Amino acid sequence: MKFKRQFLRPILIALFISAWTVTSVSAHALLLRSNPAANAVLDQPPVQVEMFFSEALEPNLSSIGVIDSNNLAVDAGDVRLDSNDPTRITVSLHRLTDGVYTVTWKAVSAIDGHQTVGTFPFAVGNANAAAVSAILQSSSYRLPISTLISKFLILAALALLVGQRLFISLVWNPALKADQIDFDSSIGKPAVWGRFYHIGLIATLVSIGIGILGQAGQTTGSELAYPWSPEMGSLLTETRLGVIWLSRLALTLLAVWLVGRKASPLRDWSAFAVNLALLFTVTLTSHAATEARPTLAILADWTHLIGMSFWLGGLVYFFTAVRHLRRLGSHLRTKLTSLLTSRFSTNALIFVGLIGLTGFYSAYLRVGSIPALIDTLYGHVLLVKQAFVAGLLTIAATNLLVISPRLKRDHLRGIAATGVVERFGKLLILELTFAGLLLASVSFLTYLPPAKVASPNTDLTGRKEVDDLTMKLDISPGRVGQNTFTLSVMMTDMGHPLPSAKEVLLRFTPDQPNIAPSELELIGQGDGTFIANGTYLSIPGNWQVQAVVRRPDAFDAFADFDFTLQKPGAADQGKTIPRETGLLILFIGLLCGLLTFSVAGARPLRMGAGVPLTLLMLGLGVFLVVRPIPVSIEQANPIPPNGDSVAAGKVIYLVHCVPCHGESGNGDGPLGLALNPRPADLSQHAIPGVHTDAQLFEWITNGFPGSSMPAFKSALSDTDRWNLVNFIRTFTPDNR
């Protein structure tokens, strides 16, 4: 109680002040920008809401909704995650009239599962810009108690599981086998160590249960979801997070099975490997996994956790080892305590060094500056964590520099230092208390947004010197689809922009022979910069982009730039998740069967619960593995937009579309004026980059959700619908 009054109260006060003094923070999946922008007043109604976040999103758990001033939904409900850019999510809108609209959104990170929610307004047409700008936008996140408990439990449990093998191998066995000691086989390992290992496994299973229920609960705004809720099924079978949770469960069951095997070095080290894999699954849902180049950050975080497992878990075994030695004679007890203290302190220094190096690297990635450390909640909790680390280091230094030399001196003099050993045991209790508080701060830190959040940057850039010119090409956002191409041309010798050019072109040549090259003319801005937009990078892979600068008083200059567009990640990975989930559930079912028939005793319980559970898991796993995977293909338009195709599409449009959309595509046809919601303004939907040809084709085929737009899949052939898409593209403002 004395310790609590002296130390615990100031620590809690420090945590409270840290939380209280920070007025606002951003969540993990940060909203970077949107179109329309927050508080914007638009002359023309938008056809969709487009949002970009700082992390890849989980499409099955993220959403966007748009309501008008009467609280009525005006979005089509077709929330889509961009298959080429998993940080971009969109939703289509019905025809909007003048007024103020509110966007509500929920973003769940596909990496760590943390959820962000927010709102922002925008207005269309005749609206008071000052009043709209005064409406506050919001962005917030929840810090569920269940997830904090789950993270603390699994960190503490893995410290016990991983720390035991490290402590036995690096401290306990070497100390007992040292030449200075007459080894006494009757000393043995403390019996409580086996119970600690079992407690660690049970805590891991409890952590997984709470974590899965809490993760699913976040999608509905509740603390915990029901095990039978649809959100649970969606989480486990359709998301990357579900794969990680099931992997964690499978590894834990494998560790449980290994405990029941006959004791041997192979069993012990196999269990250690499984526990390290469990520790790695924690890293896969950490801040490190959200980095743009996560490999080094993940390895550093894993090393950090291994070091903490030895230091904090080893403290538990060190403390119980010292208490275990009480039954020995005072002289032997002094010698063994001295050796254990020396070996533990030496190894702790190595692991603390690893913790320090990896911790500094992580702080650089997630804080980045002194002001961020001082002004953010993440920085405050990190400072509190370092205070706990400093306390542990102070105690460790006392053990190494004061306690250990005194025990060794008393041992050499033949003195039974019983009083020193007793005081050393009390010091270990203090150290264990600091270790528990350190784990609590780490758990809290995991669910806080980093102080430093880097915006994902996929822009492609290149620089070439050709003849007397220096050309710099920027392609933004540097992904398949709509991009902005900016070519800056400088006179190399004179150091000023190119004053004029007859023509500036970009020629795009993919490495696939079945895709024809294309050409784009850039528009000069008068300062040596030439810009244009277009969907000229149409497929992932390697592209050669040739810049051509034609001048009236010099030879044409050609510069070749080589770029690689990454393959779409979100859609392809999502297709494999149900199958991966099925294989994991099959493996879990097999482990349940092994445990059912390998555990001795309690036959009615094993047969009454174990066998049905095994059959259920095996059946569910087989169902998910053999179930056909739904395929969503971003189909390319097979018909080139030439004059014949556009003419054929125009005939179809006049027959089937004019009554609603009108001759100019503005949604002002005689029937469209009476519809609610009004037909879409095709001049906005047809702008390149807003929708793909495949999306327009899908709407023509199956109808537009939430509107009176009919499905034409039975009335028009595939060729007719593609021709109609090519004609609709002529409604863009640039073609009028």
Image: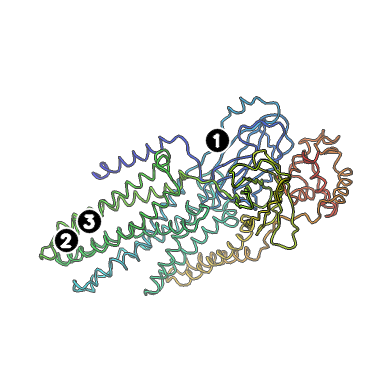
- Locate residue 525, reporting x and y percent: 67, 39
Label 3 crowd (10 A; few <14 / some 14-19 / many >=20): many
The vertical placement of 149 against 22, above or below, is below
How many marks overall?
Answer: 3
> Does residue 139 appear to the left or right of 103 in the view shown?
left
Q: Could you say which is closer to the camera, residue 547 or residue 206? A: 547
Residue depicted at x 55% and y 56%: 242
Q: Amino acid at mark 1?
A: Ser
> Does residue 459 appear to the left or right of 335 in the view shown?
right
Q: Quadrant of the C terminus?
A: top right
Which numbered disc covers residue 407?
2
The vertical placement of 33 against 126, above or below, is below
Circle nearer the N terminus (1, 3): 1
Residue for badge 3? 399
Residue for badge 1? 138
Q: Amino acid at mark 3?
A: Asn
